[in-house]
Image (cartoon, grey):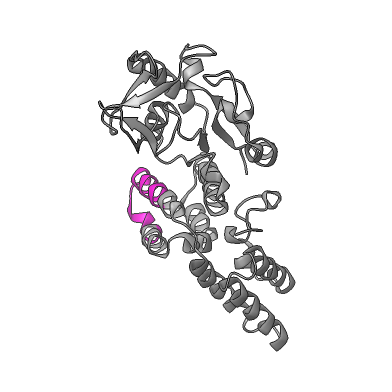
Amino acid sequence: MKSGIRIGVSTCLLGEKVRYDGGHKLDHFITDILGPLVEYVPVCPEYEAGFGIPREAFRLVGDPASPRMVTQKTGVDVTERMRSWIGPKLRDLEGLDLCGFIFKSRSPSSGMERVKVYDEKGNARKAGSGLFAAAFMRRFPLVPVEEEGRLNDVHLRENFIVRVFAFRRWKDLLEGKAGRGEIVAFHGRHKYLLMAHSPPLLKKLGSLVAGVKDMPRGEFIARYEALFMEALRQRATVRKNVNVLSHMAGYFKKVLDPREKEELRDIIERYGREEVPLIVPVTLIRHFVRRYGVDYLEGQYYLEPHPAELKLRNHA
């Protein structure tokens, strides 16, 4: 990475006592595992908007598409006060080059999705987003976002981290004022990572890159980055990973001896049956790449899309 990775995060997830009851929601994956590799930008909308600690809890009411934020017991509407803080805050965050944001789940200000919204009868539907989270996602649609609760799912966790590191690489490319050759190389190095997430969007991206010289740079950049991030949002399933691993195995047809071919085929099949995690076939392929000097595969981000110390593929 040319630049460091900066991620926004709900302040309480770092162990800071900023919740309505004076408590916190320390998340050890965020602080202990991911933390040493990134720089966090903590945000607590309710505290920063001046509601104090402790404070009366809030909830969302009305239309889930455009809810109001009110105090839970006294029913005071604080929507406009929150919105008056959100606007300037988003402008501040715009200058911080964020590569991701981790929100506090179920929060009326920071919940990403499925936040309770109450109707006039007091009935709740898990159909809303917190006011700040919703505004952030509208303002920064390409920035990878996730909630701390969903990060307990190993597949969602890896998907989020893959997108964060890929987004940083894309930003680094643009900061270097990349020409056609650099763009083609960037796409080529992400080919198998994209294939693992969305073969249809990989095809669309390939067609877009093939015509890069015939398109104004600004238009190409906007179209490519939107498709690129959308492709990586799709889940990389076992079936799609087996497809990628099989494509990579094809590069060794002429160099592996019969025993090595059988070993590689067996490991991929065992992964396909979910008997071993993804790290096992990936490690074997990386071994063969180094041993036989397969330059094209050595440059593929699929083989190492994020730092190995995160151990994200050890359980996937």
Would you identify the image quadrant in which residue 109 lies?
Answer: top left
- Farthest residue to the right: give it: 291
Viewer-proximal residue, 313 or 216? 313
Would you identify the image quadrant in which residue 134 lies?
Answer: top left
For image coordinates 50% across by 34% down, the residue present is: 103
Q: Position of residue 254 (x, y in %)?
A: 64, 84
For image coordinates 39% across by 39% down, the residue present is: 114
Quadrant in the picture for the N terminus = top right
Q: Residue 311 in magenta?
A: no
Q: Residue 225 in magenta?
A: yes
Question: Is residue 62 at all visible to an observer of this figure?
Answer: yes
Q: Position of residue 36 (x, y in %)?
A: 70, 37
Seen in the picture, residue 310 relative to 110 is either above or below; the reply is below
For image coordinates 70% across by 38% down, the residue present is: 32
Seen in the picture, residue 265 relative to 163 is either above or below; the reply is below
Question: Is residue 164 at all visible to an observer of this figure?
Answer: no
For image coordinates 62% across by 35% down, the residue present is: 27
The magenta segment is 209-227
Q: Main secondary structure of the magenta part?
A: helix
Number of marks: 0
Q: Position of residue 288 (x, y in %)?
A: 70, 72
Q: Is residue 290 left or right of residue 174?
A: right
Viewer-proximal residue, 124 or 22? 124
Q: Position of residue 4 (x, y in %)?
A: 62, 37
Quadrant in the picture for the C terminus = bottom right
Viewer-proximal residue, 187 or 132? 132
